[in-house]
Image (cartoon, helix red, strand yellow):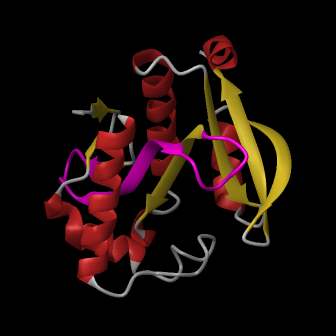
Amino acid sequence: MKVHIETDRFILRELEDDDVQGMYELDSDPDVHRFLGKKPIKTVEEASKVIDYIRGQYIDNGIGRLAIIDKKTNDFMGWSGLKYEKELRREFDYYDLGYRLIKKYWGKGIATETAIASLKYGFETLKLEEINAAAEIDHIASNTILKKVGLQFVETFEYDQVPHNWYSIKKSEWIKQQ
């Protein structure tokens, strides 16, 4: 799998071993993990294992989260993109849209811009028929982004005894929005 997606400001590309310090900065921050089960990583070795896990998804599923790289500075800002999800909704598998940013990059439209690019890649390149996403009910920013990029609220469900909102967009709906 070789993915290279460009937006006006960012490059989305496969995660690399050299991203380990950025991944550590991202996933060791308790604020980043507030709505992710509150289990931040504690070591650079754990960050390396996260990268290996995601790279394994590239091989197993042909898709996985992508590094967000600032075109001007070449800085690692977090990740965004699609993954084939088998765990969150145990009753079915689906393609999931997600994003996670280092805290200093919050509130700058990065998640929105990269989510839009990820939807386009999913529908146009991967030829997916539907893309879904979930966000904890209390995660206002993530719920707002998912609606802003065109996903529609479907239902509320519980994961690990925490209520989440479930969103979906079909390719036909996405085409109408373009």
* Viewer can see residue 134: yes
Give above or below for 3 relative to 163.
above
Q: Depth check: give the residue in front, 7 or 156.
A: 156
Residue at horizontal 28 percent and vertical 61 percent from the top = 51
Residue at 53% in and 59% down: 107
The answer to whether residue 83 is above or below residue 128 is below
Name the residue rendered at 25%, 52% in the picture. Answer: 15
55 up-or-down from 163: above or below = above
Quadrant for the C terminus in the image = top right
Q: Who is closer to the viewer here, 3 or 178? A: 3
Q: Answer yes or no: is residue 63 visible.
A: no
Q: Nearer the viewer, residue 74 or 163?
A: 163
Boundaries of the magenta span? 68-93
How many marks are shown on the rendered structure?
A: 0
Residue 128 position within the rendered picture, expressed as x and y whole percent measured from the top left? 53, 21
Q: Quadrant of the N terminus?
A: top left
Q: Quadrant of residue 21?
A: bottom left
Q: Is residue 116 above or below residue 25?
A: above
Residue lying at the far left in this picture: please name it: 18
Q: Is residue 66 left or right of residue 134?
A: left
State the image coordinates of residue 29 (x, y, percent, origin top left). 44, 81
- Residue 88 at what x, y percent from top left? 64, 55
The stretch drawn in magenta includes residue 7: no
Near-viewer residue (86 or 101): 86
Q: Residue furthest bottom?
A: 42
Is 72 left, or right, of 32 in this rendering? left
Q: Position of residue 170 (x, y in %)?
A: 67, 22
Residue at x 58%, y 81% (from the top left corner) = 38
Residue 163 appears left or right of 64: right
